Image (cartoon, helix red, strand yellow):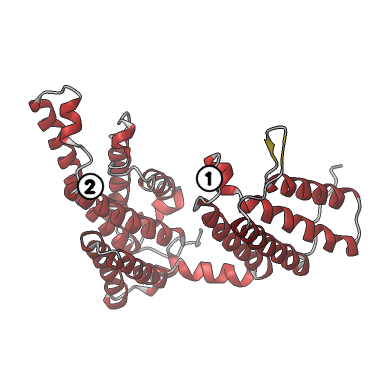
Amino acid sequence: MLRRFRIGTFRPALSFIGLLSFITSFFGSRLFATLNPTIVIQQQGIHFHHFWYGIALMGIAGWLAITWKSERLDRAYAVMYGLGAGFIGDEVGLLLTLGNYQSELTYDFFIGAISASILLLLVIRYRGLLWREVSYLMTREGLALLGVFVTGFSFILFAFGSLSFGTPLALVGIIVILREVFVKHDTVLEGRMPRGVTVIAALSILGGANLILAGVGNILFPPVNVSDLAGAGLSSGTIGLISTIFLLLAFVALGLGSLKILAGLVLRTGKSWAWSLGIATSISSIFLDASSLGTSPELLSGLLTGNGIEFPTSIIAIIYLTRPYVKAFYRNALGGPRNEKL
């Protein structure tokens, strides 16, 4: 008979000690290296960076925690592990760039690590309450909150003076808010609606906003540099054809983005045509994303869907909307009650 494993109890004190040690170690090593940039340990041409000490501390702490259990020593293990993680985290930029200690990637890592740690602690400690909150986001109020987020996020674009990008994003958020606030909703229908429909609707709205921003960007800042193409020996006719194709794709992105936002707004109505629109726009997004395959790295930054948002979200939408009980909901939206599934 297989041995049944049980998950141990959560120990917030150890997590706090480890996280505090990580923060102290990170800023302490960063401060020392900044104030004393010339102090290094180098033997026979080998520079002993402090991330090596971090690896050693984390390895020792992990091995001792496995082999020697003690409540009092566990606190020492947490301190050692946090110190080692801080030493390594301080040189993440150097490791990723192979030499640039001042790389901003280090600060990105630190912010990401702290944010992930806090979220993990919250999930472990308050998972029941958080699940209820996440379930609430899967209602129509969740779409309204999405509209608030999209509208608020557009402010950063305005702050950088990018009206051409900030304006359409703000309009998308405002439309979502107004639709969810002023349109009358069928509470009976919403009670029978699979909760995942709201998630798919949110992904569709975000994907549509992404396409609109990409389309605007490609119209205002074409990814094809005519001078570079001319230098590559292409004829003027070929250059004009390539420019026209990219411009056409930009307008296609604008139109498809608008349809995806519409699909996100109507998916919760339970109409069969809303389901068809969601499937059609998701499939179209995949084809549009596939149209960028084989593009040279120089043009990669200007691709309509090159940021990787459209393809995964469209795949998720297609998989979910074609699940039997979801299709049954759209076929029988006006029928009797059905079991709710996620």
Q: Name the residue located 27 percent from the left edge and 74 percent from the top edge.
A: 178
Residue labelled with disc 2: 253
Q: Residues at badges 2 and 1 in contact (C-beta under 8 Å)?
A: no
Secondary element under disc 2, as helix, strand or loop, is helix
Q: Is residue 284 left or right of residue 328?
A: left
Relative to 276, 311 lies left or right:
right
Q: Amino acid at mark 2?
A: Ala
What's the CA distance linking mark 2 and mark 1? 38 Å
Three-letter amino acid code at the position of disc 1: Asn
187 to 220, vertically: above or below: below
Q: Quadrant of the N terminus?
A: top right
Quarter where residue 228 is shown: top left
| Residue closest to the eye, 190 or 255 | 255
Is 75 positioned to the left or the right of 218 in the image? right
Residue marked by disc 1: 100
| Up/down of 81 relative to 173, above or below | above
Q: Residue at x 55, y 39 (%)?
A: 98
How packed is label 2: few (under 14 Cα within 10 Å), some, or many (20 or more)? Answer: many
Q: Nearer the viewer, residue 133 or 288?
A: 288
Vertically, is 65 above or below 12? above
